[in-house]
Amino acid sequence: MGSALCGPKRKKVQVSASWVGNESENPFETVLTKKERVLLRETFQRLDEPKEIVGMIFVDIVNDIEPELKKVFGVDRAPKAAMLKMPKFGGHVARFTELIDQVVLTTSMVGYTENLVGAWQLVRKTGRIHVKQGFLEQNQNQLEKNYFEIVMNIFIERFI
């Protein structure tokens, strides 16, 4: 009888559809080319006011691209100019800007530093927060729009 510690090491298997669960795969390396990752990092570094830029992109998304998100963020009756001052929407913009800053500038998600554990923790925390949103879950389960993909594609398009 041998101890479990002496047996062969089992590979971790990804049991969900989430790329966050797979430790060997960096989504930024599979979705973006090295050139795109460098461009993303350099573009974000050059921004004087990243929160303002991220805010403008989010305002465009909820006004022009996916207006049904206005209600989710509580800006369905707010004029375009006042949206960023609304607590739920403005807070989301601030947190998303911080996430981009952490992922792009201070972690290895785009291949620069060695804080991969911190990067995964940040992404997992963000994912757990979004899983609790009934609106997103309802749309994901019905295989309608993938709002995460829509938002990320818009940001990639605008930054790269």
Image (tube, rainbow, N blue to C red):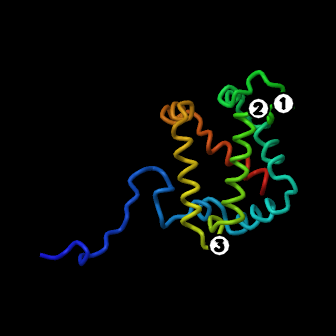
Q: Which residue is drawn at 85% across and 57% down?
A: 47
- Whether tag 3 and tag 1 are in contact, CB under 8 A, the answer is no
Mark 3 or mark 2: name the one nearer the start of the chain: 2
Residue located beneath label 1 in the image = 82
Image height of 49 relative to 90, above or below: below
Mark 2 secondary-structure assignment: loop
The residue nearer to you, when weighing 148 against 114, is 114
- Whether tag 1 and tag 2 are in contact, CB under 8 A, the answer is yes
- x and y percentages locating residue 30 in the rendered image: 58, 62
- x and y percentages locating residue 80 in the rendered image: 84, 30
Q: Residue at x 53, y 53 (%)?
A: 124
Q: Which amino acid does label 3 sit on?
A: Thr
Q: What residue type is labelled 2?
A: Met
- x and y percentages locating residue 4 in the rendered image: 22, 72
Please state if 91 lies on the left or on the right of 26 as rendered: right
Q: Which residue lies furthest to the front in this view?
A: 87
Residue located beneath label 2 in the image = 86
Mark 1 secondary-structure assignment: helix
